[in-house]
Image (spheres, helix red, strand yellow):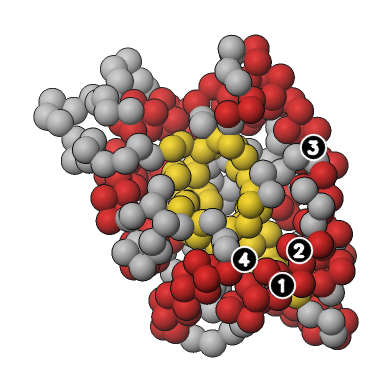
Amino acid sequence: MQAAVHLPQVPFAGPATELPARARDVVDAAGDLGFVAVSANDHFTFSTQWVDGLMLLASIAERAGPLELMTTVALPALRGPVAFASSITALAAMSKGRVVAGVGPGSSAADHGLAGLDWSRRWQRYDETLQVLRSLLGGDGVPAGLRFYAPADQPTAVLTDVPHVQLWPASWGSEAGLRRVAAHGEGWLASAYHTSPDEFGLARTRLEAALRRRGADPGGFGHAVVTMWTYVSDRPETTRRILADVLAPALGRAPDALRGRVCVGSPAECTRLVGAYAAQGCRRMHFWPIADEVEQLELLAHHVLPGVVQ
């Protein structure tokens, strides 16, 4: 199983103005420690300050070297699929590595409200967004006959002479969500704190069946578990504080609902959780250190990942 790292976007520790510098340190450490990719998420509003993910990825693109750059996930239906495609292909032009557009419909009614969009129509809009993105990232224009988007009279600003940007839709594992992944994507993103290793394994099996029904090869289809909130520590009081005082308020969930679903605990506990995902066929995990990012990546690289049975 490959390991990737999520860039710091939320000021859990220290002011938000320090996050870009911390992101640069994360990229340097990720490359040195053998991680394969760096990623960033997307919200218009959150329980605390939030650094824009696309801007953060652009700020480290030249520094990332061979590391893959990934959105996990971005909200093209809210940003507009043409504007998002323009940004993500510009990121591909800046980057020396691959770029993957992980996308979702948006799980926040508040985000939709800020974008001036009707929350009740999010699935219809998202379905069209996936069609538009597939066309634009494939070098074509906006397809005709859509409800929410119209083809342009002139070519769009989406770059076509850049390396191919893969499209990976996100789903928590519903039947409808996995059908969208099979129909539109080149990979699947699952959210760690919305699932478990067993639930991930069942969803992966259903996705592979959906791919076979469409004549696609599941073996060539990427997938990853993302937003794996991470804090590795041998001090139980520290991990209890991280869960109760940091993550639970930020995510609006009870600490007990997060325990065992996020990589917050001792090295042995984290190894068991990550290993359980690997046993279910997870091909990549994106770790999001809550604080002390470089130290946490070192702990993962030296004390967690070596114990994961592939």
Q: Residue furthest left?
A: 154
x 19%, y 41%: residue: 157
Q: Earlier in the sequence, mark 3 or mark 2?
A: 3
Mark sitting on residue 266: none
**Residues at circles 2 and 1 in contact by the CB criterion of under 8 Å:** yes
Whether residue 248 is visible, yes or no, is no
Q: Which residue is mark 4?
A: 288
Q: Which residue is mark 2?
A: 306
Identify which amino acid the numbered label 3 is placed on.
Answer: Gly
Neighbour tally class for label 1: few under 14, some 14-19, many 20 plus, Cα within 10 Å: few
Q: Earlier in the sequence, mark 4 or mark 2?
A: 4
Identify which amino acid the numbered label 1 is placed on.
Answer: His
x 43%, y 75%: residue: 24
Identify which amino acid the numbered label 2 is placed on.
Answer: Pro
Q: Is residue 51 left or right of residue 285?
A: left
Q: Which residue is mark 1?
A: 302
Disc 4 and disc 1: Cα gap in Å?
A: 17 Å
Residue 138, percent from left and from top: 33, 28
Q: Is residue 170 left or right of residue 18?
A: right
SS class of the residue under badge 2? helix
SS class of the residue under badge 1? helix
Disc 2 and disc 1: Cα gap in Å?
A: 6 Å
Disc 3 and disc 2: Cα gap in Å?
A: 22 Å
Disc 3 and disc 1: Cα gap in Å?
A: 26 Å
Whether residue 61 is visible, yes or no, is yes
**Residues at circles 4 and 2 in contact by the CB criterion of under 8 Å:** no
Q: Is residue 185 left or right of residue 197?
A: left
Q: Which residue is mark 3?
A: 201
Circle 4 or circle 1, nearest the eye: 1
Identify which amino acid the numbered label 4 is placed on.
Answer: Trp
Q: Nearer the viewer, residue 94 or 110?
A: 94
**Residues at circles 3 and 2 in contact by the CB criterion of under 8 Å:** no
